[in-house]
Image (cartoon, rainbow, N blue to C red):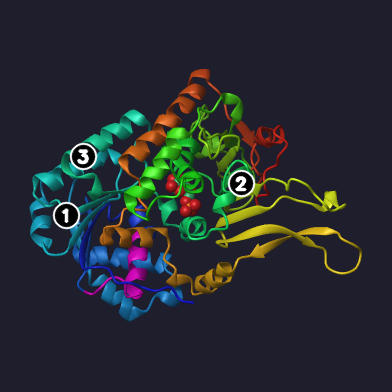
Amino acid sequence: MVSRVIPVDTFDLVIFGGTGDLARRKIFPGLYRRFMAGQMNDASRIFGAARAALSEQEFRDQIGAALKEFVATDRLEPEAVEGFLARIFYVPINAREESGWEKLKSTLRGDVVRAFYFSVAPNLFPDLAERLHAHGITDATSRIVVEKPFGRDLASARALNEVLARYFHEDQIYRIDHYLGKETVQNLMAVRFANILFEPIWNSQHVDHVQITVAETMGVNGRGAYYDKSGAMRDMVQNHLMQLLCLIAMEPPYHFDPDAVRDEKLKVIRALQPVPPQNIVRGQYLAGGGEGSYLEHCDNPDSRTESYIAMKVEIANWRWKGTPFYLRTGKRLRARHSEIAITFKEPPHLIFDDAEGWKENVLVIRLQPNEGMHLMVMIKEPGPGGMRLMQVPLDMTFATAYAEAAEAAEDVPDAYERLIMDVIRGNQTLFMRGDEVEAAWAWADPIIEGWEARGDKPQGYDPGSSGPEDALMLIHRDGRRWREIK
Ligand code: BG6
Protein backbone atom coordinates (compact mmCIF):
# COMPACT_ATOMS: atom_id res chain seq x y z
CA MET A 1 0.00 0.00 0.00
CA VAL A 2 1.51 3.31 -1.04
CA SER A 3 0.12 6.56 0.29
CA ARG A 4 -1.90 8.68 -2.11
CA VAL A 5 -0.36 12.01 -3.01
CA ILE A 6 -2.69 14.91 -3.66
CA PRO A 7 -0.77 17.86 -5.15
CA VAL A 8 -1.22 21.20 -3.45
CA ASP A 9 -1.78 24.55 -5.15
CA THR A 10 1.15 26.61 -6.40
CA PHE A 11 2.79 28.53 -3.56
CA ASP A 12 5.47 31.01 -2.57
CA LEU A 13 6.77 30.01 0.85
CA VAL A 14 9.14 32.30 2.73
CA ILE A 15 11.11 30.73 5.55
CA PHE A 16 12.44 33.28 8.02
CA GLY A 17 15.33 31.66 9.81
CA GLY A 18 16.11 29.95 6.50
CA THR A 19 19.71 29.25 7.51
CA GLY A 20 18.72 27.93 10.94
CA ASP A 21 18.83 24.45 12.36
CA LEU A 22 15.15 23.60 11.98
CA ALA A 23 15.15 24.75 8.35
CA ARG A 24 18.21 22.62 7.56
CA ARG A 25 17.13 19.53 9.48
CA LYS A 26 13.40 19.43 8.89
CA ILE A 27 11.84 22.07 6.67
CA PHE A 28 13.97 21.90 3.50
CA PRO A 29 14.49 18.11 3.59
CA GLY A 30 10.74 17.74 4.14
CA LEU A 31 9.90 20.00 1.22
CA TYR A 32 12.35 18.10 -0.95
CA ARG A 33 10.58 14.85 -0.15
CA ARG A 34 7.21 16.41 -1.01
CA PHE A 35 8.73 17.67 -4.26
CA MET A 36 9.98 14.15 -5.01
CA ALA A 37 6.56 12.72 -4.23
CA GLY A 38 4.96 15.10 -6.72
CA GLN A 39 3.00 16.99 -4.09
CA MET A 40 4.74 20.31 -4.69
CA ASN A 41 4.46 21.40 -8.30
CA ASP A 42 7.18 22.94 -10.49
CA ALA A 43 5.77 26.45 -10.29
CA SER A 44 6.07 26.63 -6.49
CA ARG A 45 8.98 28.51 -4.95
CA ILE A 46 10.67 28.56 -1.56
CA PHE A 47 12.53 31.57 -0.24
CA GLY A 48 15.04 31.36 2.54
CA ALA A 49 15.25 34.62 4.45
CA ALA A 50 17.93 35.34 7.04
CA ARG A 51 20.42 37.97 8.10
CA ALA A 52 23.49 36.45 6.44
CA ALA A 53 24.67 38.17 3.27
CA LEU A 54 24.55 35.08 1.06
CA SER A 55 24.18 34.86 -2.68
CA GLU A 56 21.44 32.67 -4.11
CA GLN A 57 24.06 30.12 -5.13
CA GLU A 58 25.66 30.04 -1.68
CA PHE A 59 22.27 29.43 -0.10
CA ARG A 60 21.42 26.69 -2.60
CA ASP A 61 24.75 25.06 -1.80
CA GLN A 62 23.89 25.12 1.90
CA ILE A 63 20.52 23.53 1.25
CA GLY A 64 22.13 20.96 -1.06
CA ALA A 65 24.46 20.02 1.79
CA ALA A 66 21.52 19.83 4.22
CA LEU A 67 19.70 17.45 1.88
CA LYS A 68 22.76 15.21 1.77
CA GLU A 69 22.85 15.14 5.53
CA PHE A 70 19.16 14.71 6.30
CA VAL A 71 17.57 12.87 3.36
CA ALA A 72 18.07 9.12 2.87
CA THR A 73 20.74 8.55 0.21
CA ASP A 74 18.51 6.40 -1.97
CA ARG A 75 16.10 9.33 -2.25
CA LEU A 76 18.73 11.79 -3.39
CA GLU A 77 18.33 11.60 -7.13
CA PRO A 78 20.65 14.18 -8.71
CA GLU A 79 18.02 15.38 -11.19
CA ALA A 80 15.42 15.80 -8.49
CA VAL A 81 17.87 17.63 -6.22
CA GLU A 82 18.75 19.98 -9.06
CA GLY A 83 15.08 20.55 -9.87
CA PHE A 84 14.31 21.26 -6.23
CA LEU A 85 17.25 23.62 -5.70
CA ALA A 86 16.20 25.58 -8.81
CA ARG A 87 13.01 26.44 -6.91
CA ILE A 88 14.90 27.87 -3.95
CA PHE A 89 15.78 31.53 -3.59
CA TYR A 90 17.43 33.64 -0.94
CA VAL A 91 16.53 37.03 0.50
CA PRO A 92 18.90 38.67 2.99
CA ILE A 93 16.64 40.32 5.53
CA ASN A 94 16.83 41.45 9.12
CA ALA A 95 13.58 41.30 11.07
CA ARG A 96 14.57 44.46 12.92
CA GLU A 97 15.69 46.56 9.93
CA GLU A 98 13.89 48.03 6.96
CA SER A 99 16.11 46.85 4.12
CA GLY A 100 15.20 43.83 2.03
CA TRP A 101 11.44 43.97 2.53
CA GLU A 102 10.55 45.86 -0.66
CA LYS A 103 12.64 43.41 -2.67
CA LEU A 104 10.81 40.53 -1.06
CA LYS A 105 7.50 42.18 -1.88
CA SER A 106 8.33 42.64 -5.55
CA THR A 107 9.53 39.04 -5.83
CA LEU A 108 6.41 37.35 -4.50
CA ARG A 109 3.49 36.60 -6.78
CA GLY A 110 -0.02 37.78 -6.10
CA ASP A 111 -1.93 34.89 -7.61
CA VAL A 112 -0.50 31.97 -5.64
CA VAL A 113 -0.70 30.85 -2.02
CA ARG A 114 1.64 32.99 0.10
CA ALA A 115 2.94 31.53 3.32
CA PHE A 116 5.51 32.83 5.80
CA TYR A 117 7.21 30.44 8.18
CA PHE A 118 8.57 32.10 11.35
CA SER A 119 11.35 29.63 12.13
CA VAL A 120 13.03 32.16 14.44
CA ALA A 121 13.17 33.00 18.15
CA PRO A 122 9.70 34.04 19.38
CA ASN A 123 10.94 37.51 20.36
CA LEU A 124 11.19 38.22 16.61
CA PHE A 125 7.58 37.25 15.85
CA PRO A 126 6.24 40.76 16.52
CA ASP A 127 8.89 42.40 14.29
CA LEU A 128 8.26 39.99 11.45
CA ALA A 129 4.50 40.34 11.67
CA GLU A 130 4.68 44.10 11.78
CA ARG A 131 7.10 44.49 8.85
CA LEU A 132 5.27 42.01 6.64
CA HIS A 133 2.13 44.01 7.23
CA ALA A 134 3.71 47.47 6.99
CA HIS A 135 5.32 46.67 3.64
CA GLY A 136 2.09 45.28 2.26
CA ILE A 137 3.63 41.85 1.75
CA THR A 138 0.75 40.02 3.38
CA ASP A 139 -2.96 40.34 2.76
CA ALA A 140 -6.04 38.60 4.14
CA THR A 141 -5.23 35.43 2.21
CA SER A 142 -1.61 35.06 3.39
CA ARG A 143 -0.68 32.49 6.02
CA ILE A 144 1.90 32.61 8.76
CA VAL A 145 3.39 29.61 10.50
CA VAL A 146 4.77 30.02 14.01
CA GLU A 147 7.00 27.59 15.82
CA LYS A 148 6.98 26.73 19.48
CA PRO A 149 7.70 27.84 22.13
CA PHE A 150 4.55 29.90 21.93
CA GLY A 151 5.17 31.94 25.05
CA ARG A 152 6.61 30.73 28.34
CA ASP A 153 3.50 31.41 30.41
CA LEU A 154 -0.03 32.67 29.97
CA ALA A 155 0.92 36.35 29.97
CA SER A 156 3.58 36.01 27.27
CA ALA A 157 1.40 33.72 25.12
CA ARG A 158 -1.45 36.20 25.39
CA ALA A 159 0.87 39.06 24.42
CA LEU A 160 2.05 37.11 21.37
CA ASN A 161 -1.50 36.30 20.35
CA GLU A 162 -2.42 39.95 20.68
CA VAL A 163 0.45 41.12 18.50
CA LEU A 164 -0.29 38.55 15.80
CA ALA A 165 -3.99 39.40 15.94
CA ARG A 166 -3.16 43.00 15.08
CA TYR A 167 -2.03 41.92 11.64
CA PHE A 168 -3.61 38.55 10.96
CA HIS A 169 -6.96 36.81 11.46
CA GLU A 170 -6.91 33.65 13.50
CA ASP A 171 -7.59 31.62 10.36
CA GLN A 172 -4.29 32.85 8.90
CA ILE A 173 -2.18 31.76 11.89
CA TYR A 174 -0.74 28.23 11.93
CA ARG A 175 0.78 27.44 15.35
CA ILE A 176 2.85 24.31 14.92
CA ASP A 177 2.91 21.45 17.36
CA HIS A 178 4.73 18.85 15.32
CA TYR A 179 3.24 16.03 17.41
CA LEU A 180 -0.07 16.69 15.69
CA GLY A 181 1.59 15.94 12.36
CA LYS A 182 2.70 12.47 13.39
CA GLU A 183 1.00 9.69 11.48
CA THR A 184 -0.07 7.69 14.52
CA VAL A 185 -1.47 10.72 16.28
CA GLN A 186 -3.86 11.21 13.41
CA ASN A 187 -4.63 7.53 13.38
CA LEU A 188 -5.79 7.93 16.93
CA MET A 189 -8.59 10.16 15.69
CA ALA A 190 -9.44 7.75 12.88
CA VAL A 191 -9.56 4.79 15.26
CA ARG A 192 -11.70 6.65 17.76
CA PHE A 193 -14.15 8.30 15.41
CA ALA A 194 -14.44 5.98 12.43
CA ASN A 195 -15.24 2.87 14.48
CA ILE A 196 -18.19 2.05 16.70
CA LEU A 197 -16.08 -0.41 18.67
CA PHE A 198 -14.21 1.86 21.04
CA GLU A 199 -16.56 4.72 21.78
CA PRO A 200 -18.94 2.85 24.13
CA ILE A 201 -16.05 1.85 26.40
CA TRP A 202 -14.04 5.09 26.04
CA ASN A 203 -14.88 6.47 29.47
CA SER A 204 -14.16 6.14 33.17
CA GLN A 205 -16.59 3.25 33.57
CA HIS A 206 -14.37 1.09 31.41
CA VAL A 207 -10.97 2.76 31.30
CA ASP A 208 -8.88 2.19 34.41
CA HIS A 209 -6.16 4.67 33.51
CA VAL A 210 -4.18 6.16 30.65
CA GLN A 211 -0.40 6.44 30.39
CA ILE A 212 1.31 8.84 28.01
CA THR A 213 5.06 8.38 27.73
CA VAL A 214 7.52 10.36 25.64
CA ALA A 215 10.98 9.05 26.50
CA GLU A 216 14.14 10.26 24.79
CA THR A 217 17.70 9.00 24.97
CA MET A 218 19.32 12.30 24.01
CA GLY A 219 20.35 14.88 26.58
CA VAL A 220 20.11 18.64 26.23
CA ASN A 221 23.70 19.15 25.11
CA GLY A 222 23.89 21.93 22.57
CA ARG A 223 20.49 23.29 23.60
CA GLY A 224 21.25 23.73 27.30
CA ALA A 225 20.84 27.51 27.35
CA TYR A 226 17.32 27.36 25.87
CA TYR A 227 16.29 24.23 27.72
CA ASP A 228 17.32 25.43 31.14
CA LYS A 229 14.84 28.30 30.91
CA SER A 230 12.17 25.91 29.86
CA GLY A 231 12.34 22.39 31.30
CA ALA A 232 10.25 19.35 30.46
CA MET A 233 7.00 20.97 31.58
CA ARG A 234 7.25 23.90 29.19
CA ASP A 235 9.16 22.08 26.46
CA MET A 236 7.01 18.96 26.22
CA VAL A 237 4.02 18.74 28.57
CA GLN A 238 2.30 22.07 27.96
CA ASN A 239 2.26 21.36 24.23
CA HIS A 240 3.05 17.87 22.91
CA LEU A 241 1.76 15.71 25.77
CA MET A 242 -1.19 18.04 26.24
CA GLN A 243 -2.18 17.59 22.60
CA LEU A 244 -1.98 13.81 22.92
CA LEU A 245 -4.10 13.92 26.04
CA CYS A 246 -6.68 16.07 24.26
CA LEU A 247 -7.01 13.67 21.34
CA ILE A 248 -7.63 10.76 23.69
CA ALA A 249 -9.97 12.60 26.00
CA MET A 250 -12.01 14.84 23.70
CA GLU A 251 -15.64 14.31 22.78
CA PRO A 252 -16.38 13.37 19.17
CA PRO A 253 -16.43 16.61 17.16
CA TYR A 254 -19.52 17.04 14.96
CA HIS A 255 -17.27 17.06 11.89
CA PHE A 256 -13.57 16.69 11.10
CA ASP A 257 -13.29 20.39 10.70
CA PRO A 258 -10.59 22.64 12.21
CA ASP A 259 -12.76 24.53 14.64
CA ALA A 260 -14.98 21.60 15.53
CA VAL A 261 -11.89 19.57 16.50
CA ARG A 262 -10.23 22.43 18.33
CA ASP A 263 -13.40 23.34 20.22
CA GLU A 264 -13.44 19.82 21.67
CA LYS A 265 -9.75 19.90 22.57
CA LEU A 266 -10.22 23.22 24.31
CA LYS A 267 -13.00 21.78 26.48
CA VAL A 268 -10.63 19.04 27.67
CA ILE A 269 -7.90 21.53 28.61
CA ARG A 270 -10.39 23.63 30.51
CA ALA A 271 -11.56 20.58 32.43
CA LEU A 272 -8.05 19.70 33.62
CA GLN A 273 -7.76 19.83 37.38
CA PRO A 274 -4.98 21.67 39.21
CA VAL A 275 -2.21 19.18 39.97
CA PRO A 276 -1.18 19.03 43.65
CA PRO A 277 2.58 18.78 44.39
CA GLN A 278 2.29 15.16 45.57
CA ASN A 279 1.14 14.19 42.06
CA ILE A 280 4.27 15.54 40.35
CA VAL A 281 7.81 14.16 40.24
CA ARG A 282 10.59 16.10 38.58
CA GLY A 283 14.06 14.83 37.79
CA GLN A 284 17.44 15.80 36.39
CA TYR A 285 19.74 13.29 34.72
CA LEU A 286 23.06 12.58 36.34
CA ALA A 287 26.37 12.02 34.58
CA GLY A 288 27.00 8.58 33.12
CA GLY A 289 27.69 6.57 29.99
CA GLY A 290 30.57 8.87 29.14
CA GLU A 291 28.35 11.96 29.12
CA GLY A 292 27.94 14.84 31.50
CA SER A 293 25.03 15.52 33.81
CA TYR A 294 22.13 17.84 33.12
CA LEU A 295 23.78 20.48 35.30
CA GLU A 296 26.94 20.26 33.20
CA HIS A 297 25.04 20.27 29.92
CA CYS A 298 23.17 23.41 30.82
CA ASP A 299 26.24 24.92 32.42
CA ASN A 300 24.31 25.91 35.52
CA PRO A 301 25.32 24.06 38.72
CA ASP A 302 22.36 25.53 40.62
CA SER A 303 19.72 24.73 38.03
CA ARG A 304 16.35 23.56 39.34
CA THR A 305 14.99 22.92 35.88
CA GLU A 306 13.63 19.43 35.21
CA SER A 307 14.81 17.20 32.39
CA TYR A 308 12.16 14.66 33.46
CA ILE A 309 8.64 15.01 34.72
CA ALA A 310 5.95 12.54 35.69
CA MET A 311 2.52 13.61 36.79
CA LYS A 312 -0.93 12.32 37.54
CA VAL A 313 -3.54 14.43 35.82
CA GLU A 314 -7.29 14.37 36.27
CA ILE A 315 -10.04 15.58 34.01
CA ALA A 316 -13.18 16.80 35.71
CA ASN A 317 -15.97 15.94 33.32
CA TRP A 318 -18.63 13.27 32.97
CA ARG A 319 -16.59 11.06 30.71
CA TRP A 320 -13.33 10.98 32.64
CA LYS A 321 -14.01 11.68 36.30
CA GLY A 322 -12.17 8.92 38.17
CA THR A 323 -9.76 7.89 35.39
CA PRO A 324 -6.25 9.19 36.02
CA PHE A 325 -3.98 10.15 33.15
CA TYR A 326 -0.33 9.51 34.03
CA LEU A 327 2.05 11.57 31.92
CA ARG A 328 5.82 11.28 31.84
CA THR A 329 8.56 12.57 29.61
CA GLY A 330 12.29 12.92 29.98
CA LYS A 331 15.73 13.12 28.43
CA ARG A 332 18.53 10.54 28.69
CA LEU A 333 16.15 7.70 29.47
CA ARG A 334 16.56 4.02 28.66
CA ALA A 335 15.12 4.16 25.14
CA ARG A 336 13.50 6.43 22.62
CA HIS A 337 10.00 5.30 23.21
CA SER A 338 6.76 7.24 22.87
CA GLU A 339 3.38 5.71 23.36
CA ILE A 340 -0.10 6.13 24.68
CA ALA A 341 -1.49 3.17 26.58
CA ILE A 342 -5.14 2.91 27.54
CA THR A 343 -5.67 0.27 30.19
CA PHE A 344 -9.20 -1.04 30.56
CA LYS A 345 -10.86 -2.30 33.72
CA GLU A 346 -11.33 -5.93 34.60
CA PRO A 347 -14.47 -7.79 33.50
CA PRO A 348 -17.24 -7.65 36.12
CA HIS A 349 -16.86 -11.34 36.87
CA LEU A 350 -14.07 -13.71 35.93
CA ILE A 351 -15.38 -17.19 35.16
CA PHE A 352 -11.99 -18.88 34.74
CA ASP A 353 -10.00 -20.37 37.55
CA ASP A 354 -6.74 -19.01 36.14
CA ALA A 355 -7.18 -15.62 37.81
CA GLU A 356 -3.42 -15.21 38.02
CA GLY A 357 -3.01 -15.54 34.28
CA TRP A 358 -5.50 -12.77 33.70
CA LYS A 359 -4.30 -9.31 32.66
CA GLU A 360 -6.10 -6.14 31.64
CA ASN A 361 -6.88 -5.22 28.05
CA VAL A 362 -4.54 -2.48 26.93
CA LEU A 363 -4.77 -0.45 23.74
CA VAL A 364 -1.28 0.71 22.87
CA ILE A 365 -0.74 3.49 20.39
CA ARG A 366 2.93 3.64 19.60
CA LEU A 367 4.27 6.92 18.25
CA GLN A 368 7.92 6.04 17.88
CA PRO A 369 9.78 4.02 17.00
CA ASN A 370 7.76 1.38 15.08
CA GLU A 371 4.62 3.47 14.76
CA GLY A 372 1.48 1.45 15.09
CA MET A 373 -1.26 0.20 17.38
CA HIS A 374 -2.07 -3.03 19.09
CA LEU A 375 -4.67 -4.23 21.53
CA MET A 376 -3.60 -6.62 24.27
CA VAL A 377 -6.29 -9.28 24.66
CA MET A 378 -6.67 -12.47 26.66
CA ILE A 379 -6.84 -15.81 24.87
CA LYS A 380 -6.60 -19.44 25.84
CA GLU A 381 -3.06 -20.67 26.06
CA PRO A 382 -2.74 -23.00 23.05
CA GLY A 383 -2.49 -26.78 23.50
CA PRO A 384 -3.49 -29.15 26.24
CA GLY A 385 -3.24 -28.22 29.89
CA GLY A 386 -6.73 -27.03 30.57
CA MET A 387 -8.17 -23.57 30.35
CA ARG A 388 -5.17 -21.36 31.02
CA LEU A 389 -5.15 -17.75 29.98
CA MET A 390 -2.48 -15.75 28.19
CA GLN A 391 -2.22 -12.23 26.92
CA VAL A 392 -1.37 -11.59 23.27
CA PRO A 393 -1.27 -8.48 21.09
CA LEU A 394 -4.07 -8.27 18.59
CA ASP A 395 -2.74 -6.63 15.46
CA MET A 396 -5.55 -4.70 13.94
CA THR A 397 -5.79 -5.11 10.17
CA PHE A 398 -4.79 -1.50 9.60
CA ALA A 399 -1.55 -2.13 11.44
CA THR A 400 -0.38 -4.49 8.70
CA ALA A 401 -1.43 -2.08 5.99
CA TYR A 402 0.29 0.67 7.89
CA ALA A 403 3.50 -1.29 8.20
CA GLU A 404 3.55 -1.88 4.44
CA ALA A 405 3.16 1.82 3.79
CA ALA A 406 5.81 2.55 6.36
CA GLU A 407 8.16 0.19 4.57
CA ALA A 408 7.98 2.52 1.61
CA ALA A 409 9.21 4.88 4.35
CA GLU A 410 9.68 8.04 2.35
CA ASP A 411 6.12 7.85 1.05
CA VAL A 412 4.75 8.47 4.51
CA PRO A 413 5.41 12.15 5.14
CA ASP A 414 7.01 13.06 8.43
CA ALA A 415 5.29 15.48 10.78
CA TYR A 416 6.78 18.67 9.33
CA GLU A 417 6.13 17.72 5.73
CA ARG A 418 2.51 16.98 6.41
CA LEU A 419 1.99 20.16 8.39
CA ILE A 420 3.59 22.41 5.76
CA MET A 421 1.39 20.86 3.09
CA ASP A 422 -1.62 21.52 5.32
CA VAL A 423 -0.61 25.18 5.55
CA ILE A 424 -0.59 25.41 1.76
CA ARG A 425 -3.97 23.66 1.62
CA GLY A 426 -5.32 26.07 4.21
CA ASN A 427 -6.28 23.31 6.64
CA GLN A 428 -5.83 24.29 10.30
CA THR A 429 -7.11 21.08 11.90
CA LEU A 430 -3.64 19.99 13.03
CA PHE A 431 -2.59 23.41 14.34
CA MET A 432 -3.22 24.97 17.71
CA ARG A 433 -5.71 27.76 18.04
CA GLY A 434 -4.77 30.78 20.15
CA ASP A 435 -7.31 30.03 22.88
CA GLU A 436 -6.07 26.44 23.15
CA VAL A 437 -2.50 27.59 23.77
CA GLU A 438 -3.65 30.09 26.35
CA ALA A 439 -5.81 27.50 28.15
CA ALA A 440 -2.83 25.12 28.27
CA TRP A 441 -0.68 27.82 29.88
CA ALA A 442 -3.48 28.74 32.28
CA TRP A 443 -3.33 25.13 33.52
CA ALA A 444 0.49 24.88 33.53
CA ASP A 445 1.29 28.25 35.14
CA PRO A 446 0.13 27.54 38.71
CA ILE A 447 1.89 24.18 38.64
CA ILE A 448 5.20 25.77 37.65
CA GLU A 449 4.69 28.70 40.03
CA GLY A 450 4.07 26.19 42.80
CA TRP A 451 7.42 24.43 42.52
CA GLU A 452 9.23 27.69 41.93
CA ALA A 453 7.72 29.22 45.08
CA ARG A 454 8.56 26.15 47.14
CA GLY A 455 12.07 26.00 45.65
CA ASP A 456 11.60 22.31 44.84
CA LYS A 457 14.70 20.61 43.54
CA PRO A 458 14.40 17.86 40.93
CA GLN A 459 15.57 14.39 41.93
CA GLY A 460 18.65 12.98 40.17
CA TYR A 461 18.25 9.92 37.95
CA ASP A 462 20.72 7.71 36.16
CA PRO A 463 21.04 8.05 32.43
CA GLY A 464 19.70 4.95 30.74
CA SER A 465 17.16 4.40 33.53
CA SER A 466 13.42 4.97 33.34
CA GLY A 467 13.53 8.08 35.51
CA PRO A 468 13.73 9.00 39.21
CA GLU A 469 12.71 6.55 41.93
CA ASP A 470 9.89 8.75 43.13
CA ALA A 471 8.20 8.49 39.76
CA LEU A 472 7.67 4.78 40.47
CA MET A 473 5.95 5.63 43.73
CA LEU A 474 3.68 8.13 42.01
CA ILE A 475 1.92 5.30 40.23
CA HIS A 476 2.62 2.38 42.64
CA ARG A 477 0.73 4.04 45.44
CA ASP A 478 -2.38 3.84 43.24
CA GLY A 479 -1.79 0.10 42.80
CA ARG A 480 -0.61 0.51 39.20
CA ARG A 481 2.73 0.36 37.42
CA TRP A 482 4.37 2.20 34.56
CA ARG A 483 4.74 0.34 31.33
CA GLU A 484 8.27 -0.57 30.50
CA ILE A 485 10.37 1.88 28.50
CA LYS A 486 12.15 -0.30 25.95
C1 BG6 B 1 10.69 19.36 20.65
C2 BG6 B 1 11.39 19.63 21.96
O1 BG6 B 1 9.53 20.15 20.54
O2 BG6 B 1 10.33 17.99 20.56
C3 BG6 B 1 12.59 18.74 22.10
O3 BG6 B 1 11.75 21.00 22.04
C4 BG6 B 1 12.23 17.29 21.89
O4 BG6 B 1 13.21 18.92 23.38
C5 BG6 B 1 11.43 17.10 20.62
O5 BG6 B 1 13.41 16.54 21.85
C6 BG6 B 1 10.91 15.69 20.50
O6 BG6 B 1 10.34 15.50 19.23
P1 BG6 B 1 10.27 14.06 18.57
O7 BG6 B 1 9.45 14.25 17.34
O8 BG6 B 1 11.68 13.66 18.28
O9 BG6 B 1 9.63 13.18 19.59
Location of residue 198 by image quarter = bottom right
Quick check: 375 left or right of 146? right
Whether residue 246 appears in this view of the structure is: yes
Residue 395 lies, in percent from the top left, at: 63, 66
> In the image, which is nearer the foreground, mark 2 or mark 3?
3
Point 20% across, 61% down: residue: 90
**Disc number placed over residue 333 in the picture, else none:** 2
> In the image, which is nearer the foreground, mark 2 or mark 1?
1
Location of residue 280 by image quarter = top right
Q: Earlier in the sequence, mark 1 or mark 3?
A: 1
Q: Nearer the viewer, residue 206 or 287?
A: 206
Report helix, strand or loop for mark 2: loop
Labelled pair 2, 1 in contact (Cβ < 8 Å): no
Residue 322 lies, in percent from the top left, at: 60, 35
Q: Is residue 103 above or below residue 284?
A: below
Q: Which residue is mark 3?
A: 165
Q: Amino acid at mark 3?
A: Ala
Quick check: 454 left or right of 374? left
* 380 falls in the magenta region: no
**Mark 3 crowdedness (10 Å alpha carbons): few <14, some 14-19, many ≥20:** some
How far, Cα to Cα, is label 2 from label 1?
A: 44 Å
Q: Amino acid at mark 1?
A: Thr
How far, Cα to Cα, is label 2 from label 3?
A: 40 Å
Q: Earlier in the sequence, mark 2 or mark 1?
A: 1
**Disc number placed over residue 67 in the picture, else none:** none
User: Over which residues does the magenta segment extend?
Assistant: 27-42
Q: Nearer the viewer, residue 155 or 378?
A: 378
How far, Cα to Cα, is label 1 from label 3?
A: 14 Å
Point 37% across, 67% down: residue: 67
**Disc number placed over residue 141 in the picture, else none:** 1
Point 63% across, 45% down: residue: 206
Report helix, strand or loop for mark 3: helix
